[in-house]
């Protein structure tokens, strides 16, 4: 374990030959990164706590934009990401992850939003007595299939979620 | 890869096996560990992406319970955020001391980083305790389940990071800034700064935008 057994020791102090390609950053890098991060953190907190914008949408978009910038600042000044780090493999892994994250986040929100929009009328029909999110199942629409437990439902009746006539209650835009 | 140590294997075998048998201070491929660790962090990023997506979907399902605006105290969150940000720069100072080979300064900055990290976890646990005491525990609504899952997973990561940090402080204290310890400190550096990046998403998306709703 002694440093003397170190075989890379081409440079006088042993480790420099090995560390040459490692990301270190300088004092200046860390200070710039820190100051930028403080500013980019303070602004969104100020926007929300001082109610700077009237519209919550504008505030929300500003917060997300500032968060995006701050993430890039952290990547550059704290994580020392460069296109050349690790021969480009670092960046490639990062880009691949970002693609997956984008698909997972936007895909989940898109699918679940549409699912919510299409399921909502069932809840409304039961008179609003049910907590949001619980599956509404009006007695009148019970079919043979879900009385036995739902396992034998045919693709046609969707396990009791069959829509009864009053289509006027539904937003036509959300019709499948 | 040519090792001076001999274990009685044939030369061809030895080239392969010496890689595992040699003491850990030598024979690591250039930066291999750091790239591998980066790929681990990217997979960790996917875990957080799944938790963020869950929160994005369930964040408005209150089940008649309290909403973000009623529960979150932004001054506490701001204090929490500053703790994590300060711990990031003090870890940076530890890395700079390490690059200069100053063992004492490295240990000092690591210790300060650990204290900031502990303050962060402490504040977060206090927040969780208050929420649970007020009946807003993870079982109250889908929103709170996803909130505790996301923020709790982040807090768990920071806690494990602190344990790792203490372990490395002991190792640096015993063996000094040898190559193996430098490599470990660099991995922890990536881990620590990565958690700060995740926290940017948490305080922006969960706390700040949540209060707006």
Image: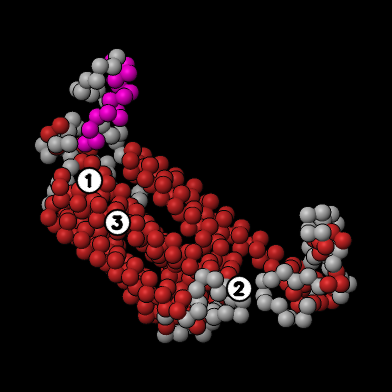
Chief secondary structure of the magenta portion: helix
Mark 1 / mark 2, whichever is N-terminal: 2
Number of residues whose C-alpha sits closer than 10 Å to that of mark 3, classed few (under 14), some (14–19) or many (20 or more): few
Q: Mark 2 falls within which chain?
A: B
Task: State the SS at label 1.
Answer: helix
Sequence order check, earlier mark of 3 and 1: 3
Q: Which of B35 and B142 lies nearest the eye of the viewer?
A: B142
* Magenta-highlighted residues: B11-26
The x and y percentages for residue B176 are 15, 46
Foreground tag (3 vs 2): 3
Disc 3 with disc 2 on a shared chain: yes
Residue at point 29% right, 28% down? Answer: B19
For the residue labelled by badge 3, is the local secondary structure a helix, a strand or a loop? Answer: helix
Query: Which image quarter holds the N terminus of chain B?
Result: top left
Closest to the camera, between mark 1 and mark 2, is: 2
Q: Are marks 1 and 2 in contact (CB under 8 Å)?
A: no
- In this view, the residue in front, B103 or A151, is A151
Residue to which mark 2 is pinned: B61
Residue A18 seen anywhere in this rendered image of the structure: yes
| Magenta span contains residue B20 | yes
State the separation of the CA atoms marked 1 and 2: 47 Å
**Up-down relation of residue A131 to residue B189 (above or below):** below
Q: Which mark is residue B182?
A: 1
Q: Tally the marks.
A: 3
Judging by the rendered image, the residue that carries numbered circle 3 is B163
Q: Residues within 10 Å of mark 1 (few under 14, many from 20)?
A: many
Q: Quadrant of residue A85?
A: top left
Report the Cα–Cα distance between label 3 and label 1: 17 Å
């Amino acid at each position: 374990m002694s440093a003397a057994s170190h075989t890379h020791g081409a440079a006088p102090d042993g480790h420099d030959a090995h560390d040459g390609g490692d990301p270190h950053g300088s004092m200046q890098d860390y200070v710039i990164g820190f100051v930028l991060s403080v500013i980019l953190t303070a602004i969104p907190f100020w926007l929300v706590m001082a109610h700077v914008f009237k519209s919550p949408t504008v505030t929300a978009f500003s917060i997300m934009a500032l968060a995006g910038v701050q993430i890039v600042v952290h990547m550059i000044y704290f994580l020392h990401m460069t296109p050349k780090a690790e021969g480009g493999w670092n960046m490639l892994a990062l880009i691949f992850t970002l693609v997956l994250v984008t698909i997972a986040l936007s895909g989940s929100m898109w699918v679940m939003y549409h699912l919510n929009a299409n399921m909502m009328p069932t809840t409304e029909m039961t008179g609003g007595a049910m907590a949001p999110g619980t599956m509404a199942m009006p007695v009148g629409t019970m079919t043979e299939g879900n009385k036995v437990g739902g396992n034998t439902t045919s693709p046609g009746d969707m396990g009791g979620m069959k829509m009864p006539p009053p289509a006027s209650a539904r937003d036509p835009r959300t019709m499948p | 890869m040519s090792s001076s140590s001999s274990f009685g294997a044939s030369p061809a075998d030895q080239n392969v096996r010496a890689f595992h048998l040699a003491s850990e201070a030598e024979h690591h491929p250039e930066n291999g560990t750091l790239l591998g660790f980066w790929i681990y962090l990217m997979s960790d990023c996917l875990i957080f992406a799944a938790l963020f997506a869950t929160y994005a979907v369930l964040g408005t399902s209150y089940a008649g319970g309290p909403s973000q605006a009623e529960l979150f105290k932004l001054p506490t969150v701001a204090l929490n955020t500053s703790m994590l940000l300060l711990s990031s720069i003090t870890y940076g100072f530890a890395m700079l001391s390490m690059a200069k080979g100053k063992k004492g300064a490295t240990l000092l900055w690591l210790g300060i980083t650990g204290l900031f990290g502990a303050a962060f976890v402490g504040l977060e646990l206090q927040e969780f305790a208050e929420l649970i005491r007020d009946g807003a525990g993870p079982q109250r609504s889908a929103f709170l389940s996803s909130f505790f899952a996301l923020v709790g997973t982040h807090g768990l990561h920071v806690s494990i990071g602190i344990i790792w940090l203490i372990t490395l402080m002991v190792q640096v204290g015993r063996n000094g800034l040898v190559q193996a310890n430098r490599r470990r400190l660099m991995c922890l550096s990536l881990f620590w700064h990565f958690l700060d990046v995740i926290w940017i998403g948490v305080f922006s998306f969960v706390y700040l935008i949540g209060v707006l709703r």
